Structure formats: C-alpha cells, structure tokens
Image: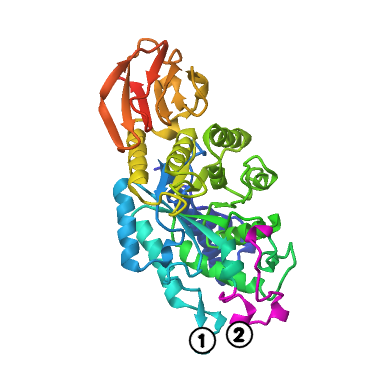
C-alpha cells in the first residue's frame, strides 16, 4: 500500500530523536507553524478575492478573481457622511446603471450641514482627540458594508488638504484652540492658515519622521489612520489614496503608504496604494514620484489630467501608459471634471474626457461630483450604460489603444482601441466625423460586423452591419453627439 508523506512539521520534529524538544515546546512550535500557515492561506485567499491588479493584464483591476472595469458617477466625494437612507438610494441607483466605483475622501468639513468630525465633542464645545465620535465611524462602517453588498469599489483618500486650510481650519478639531489635547505651542499648529493649501504651508502636512517629526500631532494622525484601517481591512473592495491632489513633500505620502501597508501586512492582508498629485501636467516631476515607484505605489491616479482638453488630454494619458510599460499598473481617474457653467469645461468636455480615458486604457473612470462634474446625472448615466454595452461586446482589457490604424483623422476627432489579430475594434467619435480604419491586420476571410452604441442614449443603435475585413475601410459617425463603434467577428 502506498504511504502518504508525513507533514513537514512532524517529520522535522522526529528527525533528531536525541534532541527532541520537550512536549510543551513541541506544541508551541507546531502551533506557530500552523499559525503561520494559516496566515499564508488567509493571505492567499484575500489576494484572490480582493481588488488588485489583474494577474493576466495588470493595467486593469480584478475583483473576486475576475477582471473588472471600474466606472463611476456619484454626487459627492465623502459619501460616508450622507444620511443612511439617502446613501442607500444613491448606491442602488448607481448599481442599476452599471456604476461600480466611488471616491470617498475622509473629509469632515461642513458643506451640507450633516458632516461630523471623527473626534468626540465635549460639553464645553471643545474636542478630545483621544476619544472618537462613534456616529462618524458608524457612518463609515455603513458605507463599507453597503458598497461591499453591491460590489462597488471604494477609493479612499485619507487626507484632503482643503480640510486643513482657509475657512475649514478655524472650526477643525485639530486646530489647537478647539481641543483639549494640545496647545498651539505644543503642537506647532496656528489658529489660522489662510493660504490656499496648494502653497503647502500648513505644518499639519510636515509631521512625519522624514520631515519635522512632530511627536505631538503625528501620533494622533496615526491613531486616526489605524482606526480607519480597523474598518477597511475587513473588506476586499477598498483602494487607498494618501491625499487629494496634494502639493506636499514626497516624504509625507511615503510615510502613510508605509504605515498603511505595514498595518495591513501585520494582519495578513494585501492592499493597493497610490498618491494623487496636484500637478496638471502628467509628465511633471511630482507624478514621477508615483509612476517611478511601483514598489511603493500599486496604481496611479491621474485625475488631474482632466484639467486638460482635446488631443492633449489623450496624448498625456498615453505618455503615462508608455512611461510605466515596464511595470504596468492600473491607472485610475477618480474625478472627471466638466459640467456646464463651470471653469473646468462644459458637460461635453466632461463626457469626452471620460470616454478618452475609457477607450485609452484607464482601469477606472468616474465622473466628478457636481457642480464641477456631472455626478450621477442623465448624461453620465448614459455614458456608463454605453460603456457597459461596449464591454459586453468587447472586454476593454483585451484591446489596446491603436490610433495608428486610423487615417484621414483630425485632432480629437476619433480614438481607437483594438486587437487586430482577433478582429476586435472599439472606435469612439467625440462628435461627428469620418475616418479610415485599417483592417488588414484582421484574419483574412473572417467577416466582421459593426454595432453602433450611442453615447447620448446609452444603448446600441440599429442592427449590426457587415464590414469588409482585410482592407482599409471608411467609418462615418452616425451623429454629431458622440458614438462608439464596436467591430467584431460576425456571429
């Protein structure tokens, strides 16, 4: 009869009978081995189910072991602060249209009169930074639970610079005149910081050991982040961004990335981390701190590219994709600007920016909240629906940007992603127009078909029509409001 091999632990303990450990020590060693094996098994299970770069194409995400395209459109940046029923209705509305990605800043400034601070407010009106406001954290816990139930990925921004300057700083608990925990002299924090946070003059963002090593404020900041992690590490659908469009020192974000990763690894968890820089130029030095540090940052948020328009918007994004080609990672754009009447461009600009990123290879694209973005509105809903229709025909993680196959194209007229060998092409027209498409790379003799999808209506338009393969063909947009052509082998 074939004998099974003994387990490693008993074999090891029996290999040196003359030096056999006493029974209590043997039990301890076995327990330790099984504990370590349990952590490894748990980590492997977590690694499979959690949100992480897709093993087959790390430019995109996978969740619960399957590739996933993250598309978002929501009406606020700190949804966890919303009243519970209002939040549930909003998330349900997102789920119905195919949106599965939200931005959640841990912001607490009083914009809508329902926001709370994370710390307990005493009867004298001051805050105790050693005690928590349970309602704040219950709200956060509720957001995580509701999004997990709906498979909606949450990208958290731990620090929002706007909370700690100008009009938001005077009432804030961290302001020394508002708490009983430290004085201005002890903390090094003043009562007012009137400058725009982009000038980076707030000492709150200089507390880490690599900066000024403020041992009064830093432990409170770390306690806050540890509290946040006590909720998020129970979930697999959370991404971590250190800041909102920061101008801080590199050492600031690096400290928090290390802190979060260390806390996660201590409990056998893997997490994905990034930083968001304020620089509108993706090719600038600030963005290199993220793009050139794959060991520190697992993905990049390139939202500030949405300050740009037209062909430049596309070209800058494609530069980033080429720049990280040796270490491909997901590129997220958690806030797409553009809404009528706003300074970042009108609603048409918002729609086109969002689509350029989707066609161009972004792993995640979300419409920014009103008033500077479209939020969850008629136009953004149509865009998300249209993208989901496209994805159902051509999984976007199977194709690559391929404008080289287009001819007779004007700047910003049309954009292409393709896998010519499989005969799959996704062609986006920003408005109307006509371009040539080189189909000579498709397999000869395999008939193709074209299905139009309306960006404005959010659904396919008409029936699929034949397209001649193996040649250069002319494709004309069916309207002037934006359309996507999905070209695939004929069924």
Q: Left or right: where does residue 186 sit relative to residue 36?
A: right
Question: Which stretch is magenta?
Answer: 170-199
Q: Are marks 1 and 2 in contact (CB under 8 Å)?
A: yes
The answer to whether residue 187 is magenta is yes
- Element type at mark 1: loop
Q: From what the image shows, is residue 265 above or below residue 382?
A: below
Give 344 or 364, whichever is nearer the viewer.
344
The residue located at (35%, 10%) in the rendering is 445
Q: Please state, as top left, top right, bottom left or bottom right, where the N terminus lies in the image.
A: top left
* Residue 122 numbered mark, or none: 1
The residue located at (46%, 40%) in the rendering is 349
Work out whether residue 479 can be spotted. yes
Which quadrant would residue 487 be assigned to in this image?
Answer: top left
Q: Position of residue 115 (x, y in %)?
A: 45, 70
Q: Please state, as top left, top right, bottom left or bottom right, where the C terminus lies in the image.
A: top left
Q: From what the image shows, is residue 343 above or below residue 172?
A: above
The residue at which mark 2 appears reads as 180
């Amino acid at each position: 009869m074939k004998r099974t091999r003994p387990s490693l632990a008993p074999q090891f303990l029996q290999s040196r009978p003359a030096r056999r450990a006493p029974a209590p020590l043997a039990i301890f060693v076995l327990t330790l081995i099984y504990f370590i094996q349990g952590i490894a098994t748990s980590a492997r299970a977590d690694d499979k189910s959690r949100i992480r770069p897709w093993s087959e194409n790390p430019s995109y995400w996978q969740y619960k072991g399957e590739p996933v395209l993250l598309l978002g459109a929501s009406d606020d940046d700190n949804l966890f602060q919303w009243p519970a029923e209002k939040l549930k209705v909003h998330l349900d509305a997102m789920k119905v249209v195919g949106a599965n990605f939200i931005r959640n800043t841990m912001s607490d400034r009083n914009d809508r009169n329902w926001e709370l601070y994370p710390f307990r407010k005493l009867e004298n009106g001051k805050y105790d930074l050693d005690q928590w406001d349970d309602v704040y954290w219950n709200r956060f816990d509720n957001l995580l639970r509701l999004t997990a139930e709906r498979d909606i990925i949450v990208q958290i921004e731990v620090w929002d610079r706007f909370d700690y300057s100008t009009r938001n700083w005077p009432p804030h608990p961290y302001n020394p005149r508002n708490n009983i925990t430290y004085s201005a002299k002890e903390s090094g924090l003043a009562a007012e910081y009137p400058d725009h946070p982009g000038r980076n003059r707030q000492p709150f963002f200089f507390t880490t050991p690599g900066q000024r090593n403020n041992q009064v404020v830093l432990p409170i900041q770390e306690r806050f982040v540890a509290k946040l992690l006590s909720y998020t590490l129970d979930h697999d659908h959370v991404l971590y961004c250190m800041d909102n469009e920061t101008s801080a020192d590199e050492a600031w974000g690096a400290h928090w990335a290390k802190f979060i990763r260390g806390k996660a690894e201590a409990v056998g968890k893997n997490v994905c981390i990034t930083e968001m820089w304020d620089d509108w130029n993706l090719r600038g030095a600030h963005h290199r701190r993220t793009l050139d540090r794959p060991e520190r940052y697992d993905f990049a948020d390139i939202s500030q590219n949405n300050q740009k328009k037209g062909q430049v918007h596309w070209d800058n994004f494609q530069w980033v994709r080429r720049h990280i080609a040796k270490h491909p990672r997901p590129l997220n754009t958690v806030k797409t600007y553009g809404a009528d009447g706003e300074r970042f461009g009108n609603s048409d600009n918002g729609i086109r920016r969002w689509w350029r990123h989707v066609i161009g290879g972004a792993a995640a694209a979300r419409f920014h909240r009103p008033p500077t973005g479209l939020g969850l509105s008629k136009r953004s809903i149509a865009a998300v629906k249209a993208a989901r229709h496209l994805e159902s025909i051509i999984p976007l993680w199977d194709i690559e940007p391929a404008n080289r196959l287009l001819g007779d194209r004007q700047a910003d007229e049309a954009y292409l992603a393709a896998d010519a060998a499989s005969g799959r092409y996704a062609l986006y027209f920003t408005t109307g127009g006509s371009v040539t498409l080189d189909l000579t790379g498709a397999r000869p003799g395999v008939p193709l078909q074209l299905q139009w999808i309306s960006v404005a209506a959010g659904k396919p338009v008409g029936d699929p029509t034949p397209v001649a393969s193996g040649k250069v063909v002319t494709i004309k947009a069916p309207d002037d409001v934006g359309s996507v052509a999905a070209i695939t082998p004929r069924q």
